[in-house]
Image: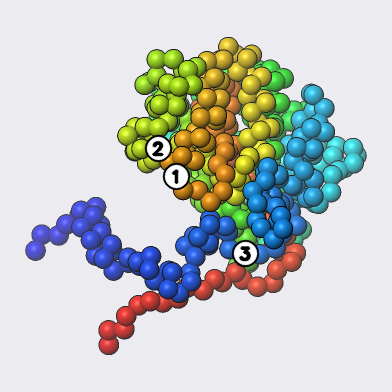
Amino acid sequence: MTRRNVETYANDQQVLCRENDFIPDSLFKEYGVNRGLRDVNGVGVLTGLTNISKIVAFQNVDGQRVPCEGQLFYRGYNIKNLIGGLGPEEFGFEKIAYLLLFGDLPSPEQLAEFTGILSDCRTLPTNFTRDVIMKAPSRDIMNSMTRSVLTLASYDDKVNGDLGNSIRQCIRLISEFPMLAVYGYHAYNHYENDDSMYIHRPDPNLSTAENILRMLRHDKSYTQLEAKALDIALILHMEHGGGNNSTFTTRVVTSSGSDTYSTMAAALCSLKGPRHGGANIKVIEMIQDIKSHLRDWTDPEETSAYLRKLLNKEAFDHSGLIYGMGHAVYSISDPREQILRSFVNQLAEEKGRQDDLALYRNIEEEAPKLISKNRPIYKGVSANIDLYSGFLYDLLGIPMELYTPLFAIARIVGWSAHRIEELVCMNKIIRPAYMSVMKERG
């Protein structure tokens, strides 16, 4: 018998897997099991308690659950007030990171100390960039970052998961993530795209957002508005309610007693999935498709006509989706989108991209009307943060390969806060139950 190679064998075996692993929807309904830990209305099944953040999308009015303007709270503070309280030239990533990690806003002295510690940790082991990051460059920077995080464990003499040690490791990884991402991109861009490579060391006197732009750009330059806009984007992506896939992954792995490096690697693997961290990339790809089919990007009627084609699965990827619209929790509005949009407006004006901005605005205004007419929805639909975050990164000249890694650079703060909370509060491994519907054969 001629033996098939593994690729052919695996492709042929798909038939058996599809036949024997398929479970019909009727059984989920019969046994009251919620797919994806979400009920029929898309509301997440309660799996834990947290004191780190909160999302508000509905209010109870006379016993009825009524959609309301979205709100996001970090440690009890409304995100709009936190960002609104920053000075015009103040960068807030470090201050809000302290809040999420330790539960209170820092005093000036506490912030100075914490910022200094982050700066001290903004370094990698000797030759790590050469021996690890550049050794096997990948177009998927999330894979590169995951490999780097796991390898960093080899350079740590204390890889145990106790509280103090975990806090130390989390702080170090928060500081190191920007380097892992940007250096990973430069290695890929050089070895795979045959482009120039430059490795700029971070400046200890600069903020996280400033250092990202400094390390990414060949001339290390950026404007105050560019750095401020990126800083705001990082704050808005830091944390989101605790129920998202990567944060839940963080809690699950932490509950097993695993170490910080393994936990954050698992969270990275979750975030890289296109259903989680890659949404803004789909928005950019959709926008590029729309531009190629419209004569006038600023015309609301022409935009609306093409959006209708998207909904009818007649254009782009034929998924029937308008990316950047709707959210698993928010209904009437996404507060993060509202905040980010104001900075996108300023950057688009500064860079002469008003026509692009007009297209995004048309999508934001026209899409909800079309979706409401064409789809049965149980709650309102509005633009989410992904509609504008990709545009912001485009305005900053950030390559698409770094869009999801930027999400990770921000979200590791939330992951760290949830890991710490899990270590402090929980003493049981998270072990969900699965009901077997297997037929016995003998």
Sequence order check, earlier mark of 3 and 1? 3
Residue shown at the point (63%, 24%) measured from the top left: 344
Q: Residue at x 32, y 34 (%)?
A: 314
Residue closer to the observer: 266 or 175: 266
For the residue carrying disc 1, how many other residues have a C-alpha within 10 Å: few (<14), some (14-19), or many (20+)? few
Q: Does residue 218 appear anywhere in the picture?
A: yes
Residue at the spot of label 2: 311
**Depicted 251 relative to depicted 361: above or below:** below
The image shows residue 387 at horizontal and vertical percentages of 54, 33
Q: Is residue 284 above or below residue 420?
A: above
Name the amino acid, label 1: Arg
Q: Are marks 3 and 1 in contact (CB under 8 Å)?
A: no
Asked where in the image residue 200 lies, by quadrant, the reply is top right
Contact between labelled residues 2 and 1, with CB atoms less than 8 Å apart? yes
Q: Tell me the element at label 3.
A: loop
> How far is mark 3 from mark 1, CA to CA?
27 Å
Disc 1 target residue: 375
Residue at the image point whose x is 61% and y is 71% from the top: 429
User: In front of the other: label 1 or label 2?
Assistant: 1
Instruction: From the viewer's side, name the closer residue of 408 and 303.
Output: 303
In the rendering, at what x and y percent does residue 120 appear? Answer: 75, 38
State left or right for residue 91 relative to residue 342. right
Q: In this view, which residue lies farthest toward the front? A: 62
Q: Amino acid at mark 3?
A: Leu
Name the mark nearer the viewer: 3 or 1.
Answer: 1
**Hey, which residue is sitting farthest bottom in the picture?**
442
Q: CA distance from mark 1 to mark 2?
A: 9 Å
Left or right of 20: which side holds 298? Answer: right
Q: Earlier in the sequence, mark 2 or mark 3?
A: 3
